[in-house]
Image (cartoon, rainbow, N blue to C red):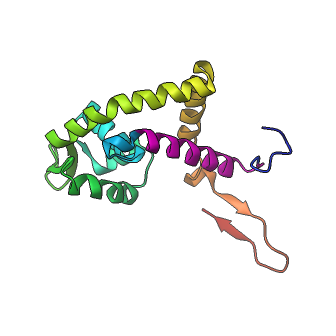
């Protein structure tokens, strides 16, 4: 992308969101025959691989707010692809578990996801795709947004200084 490209931005957040939307649209297209969207596939994949997880544990692993995860779980619950079970160690907690129907749709979606992965790596390059995943994992592990990351917000002319959290 050249410096003159109108899509190029100095904003890290916007650049990540643009790339994320572009890649998500691609994966959603490839996964469409399974009836799953990328986010739904990711949830099923994680629960399939690790077994039942509490909503909070699953949200942490997906770097997602628990309320956003709950919103994304609704269609999976409605279609009986996942179920909420009583927690193993704390009966007040609920754990997300994949059902037989969920395993079936996961098996249908898996080859489609593998195709999307291969197409992405072909387009970007295997080495660059691996480096990108490493970089994005490092970004996700940073303390951005944590209490220690609170910064002083520059005051507008004539306004009082505020502290941002």
Q: Give x and y (percent) for residue 161.
A: 75, 72
Q: Is residue 88 above or below residue 135?
A: below
For residue 19: magenta?
yes
For residue 58: magenta?
no
Q: Which residues are magenta?
A: 9-30
Q: Which quadrant is home to the C terminus? A: bottom right
Name which residue lies at 43% across and 50% down.
64
Horizontal side of 150 relative to 53 (left or right) equals: right
Q: Nearer the viewer, residue 41 or 148?
A: 41
Instruction: Report whether residue 99 is seen.
Output: no
Q: Give x and y (percent) for residue 16.
A: 63, 45
Name which residue lies at 37% across and 60% down.
67
Which secondary structure type mostly characterizes the magenta part of the structure?
A: helix
Residue at the outermost front position: 33
Horizontal side of 66 relative to 52 (left or right) equals: right
Q: Nearer the viewer, residue 135 or 22?
A: 22
Horizontal side of 125 relative to 48 (left or right) equals: right
Q: Give x and y (percent) for residue 6.
A: 79, 50
């Amino acid at each position: 992308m050249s410096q003159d490209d109108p899509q190029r931005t100095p904003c890290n957040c916007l650049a990540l969101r643009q790339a994320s939307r572009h890649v998500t649209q691609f994966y959603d297209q490839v996964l469409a025959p399974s009836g799953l969207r990328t986010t739904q596939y990711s949830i099923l994949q994680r629960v399939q691989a690790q077994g039942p997880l509490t909503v909070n544990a699953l949200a942490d692993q997906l770097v997602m707010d628990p309320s956003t995860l709950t919103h994304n779980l609704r269609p999976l619950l409605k279609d009986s692809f996942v179920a909420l079970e009583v927690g193993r160690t704390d009966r007040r907690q609920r754990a997300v578990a994949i059902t037989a129907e969920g395993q079936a749709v996961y098996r249908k979606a898996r080859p489609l996801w593998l195709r999307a992965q291969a197409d992405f790596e072909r387009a970007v390059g295997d080495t660059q795709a691996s480096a990108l995943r490493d970089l994005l994992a490092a970004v996700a592990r940073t303390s951005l947004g944590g209490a220690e990351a609170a910064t002083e917000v520059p005051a507008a002319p004539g306004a009082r200084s505020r502290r941002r959290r």
